[in-house]
Image (cartoon, rainbow, N blue to C red):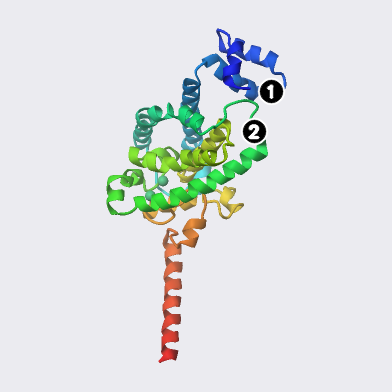
Amino acid sequence: MSSAYNVSLAAPTYSETYRNISDAYIHLSMLERLWAAWYAYMQNDVIATGLMTFVIHEVFYFGRCIPWFIIDYIPYFHKYKIQQGKVNNLKEQWQCTSAVLLSHVTVELPQIWLFHPICAYFGMSHDVPFPSFLTMFYQISLFFCLEDSWHYWNHRLLHYGPFYKYIHKQHHLYSSPFGLAAEYASPIEVMILGLGTIGSPILWCALTKNLHIFTVYIWVVLRLFQAVDAHSGYEFPWSLHHFLPFWAGSDHHDDHHRYFMGNYSSSFRWWDFLLDTEAGPKAKAERITRQKGKAEKSAAVSKKVD
Ligand SMILES: [Zn+2]
Ligand SMILES: [Zn+2]
């Protein structure tokens, strides 16, 4: 069922449109009816997708930051703060929030209006019903892997001399990060690293023609949660990486902000592990031991040859 088809069910108000859709398509879930009614009511797919994308981004980004903001004021949680004693005061957090908001409105909002035309060009669907859970699960898992790889190499590049100085330095203003700092970055960085988040599903859709905008929204929300949580500054015994050892989590990215180098990945630990770019004094000590071992081994081999 396409949104163009639903236009005949559109009514002057959104709730009337929703009722018409519900009466006509009783097999749809409530979420699918809300979705179909939105496109039918708006009667303009570009504005419907653009507005929904912007609202989802704002609600889930700032919504996810609120719990992290609150627990700063609850003494019980202080023992879980990674960098003990570091406090991000209200003024600092407000400056960060206003800069992020400004960037959302001036940099991201204009680009969001291109989202629907790009989706339509690559054949992304916005019809109902939505894809199955299994389809969304494997596609989102793939996007996590693709984005993580893109993020690792581009983030590592952003730590190179002039790229760091003119682009990435802004994101490293906070050596002890907090949730709201996740998207505190220069517009160029937002575009470079954001391409991993938006480009991965677009590439998949271009190759397979099998992707729904709803799946992209779920992916973007999960990626936002990952980014905000990674900057939270808190590490718990119940944090995800204790159960999924390859998941990066907050301690991984917190060390990146603390030591300014290493741990370049976003969601997973495997790139930094395989390429020996793990951050922190423990990883550095292990690296030195490994290098020493290698040097001793090669010296012993050359002695034998002599
Ligand atoms: Zn960095
Ligand atoms: Zn960061």
Q: Amino acid at mark 1?
A: Leu
* Residue 249 screen position, x and y as percent: 51, 49
Mark 1 → mark 2, Cα distance in angstroms: 12 Å
* Residue 168 screen position, x and y as percent: 33, 46
User: Does residue 60 sit above or below 189 in this rendering?
Assistant: above
Q: Which residue is mark 1?
A: 28
Q: Residue at x 69, y 18 (%)?
A: 25
Neighbour class for label 1 at 10 Å: few (<14), some, many (≥20)? some
Q: Which residue is mark 2?
A: 131
User: Does residue 23 sit above or below 167 in this rendering?
Assistant: above
Q: Residue 232: tell me if it is visible.
A: yes
* Residue 120 screen position, x and y as percent: 51, 29
Relative to 242, 75 lies left or right: left
* Residue 105 screen position, x and y as percent: 37, 27
Q: Residue at x 48, y 52 (%)?
A: 252
Neighbour class for label 2 at 10 Å: few (<14), some, many (≥20)? some
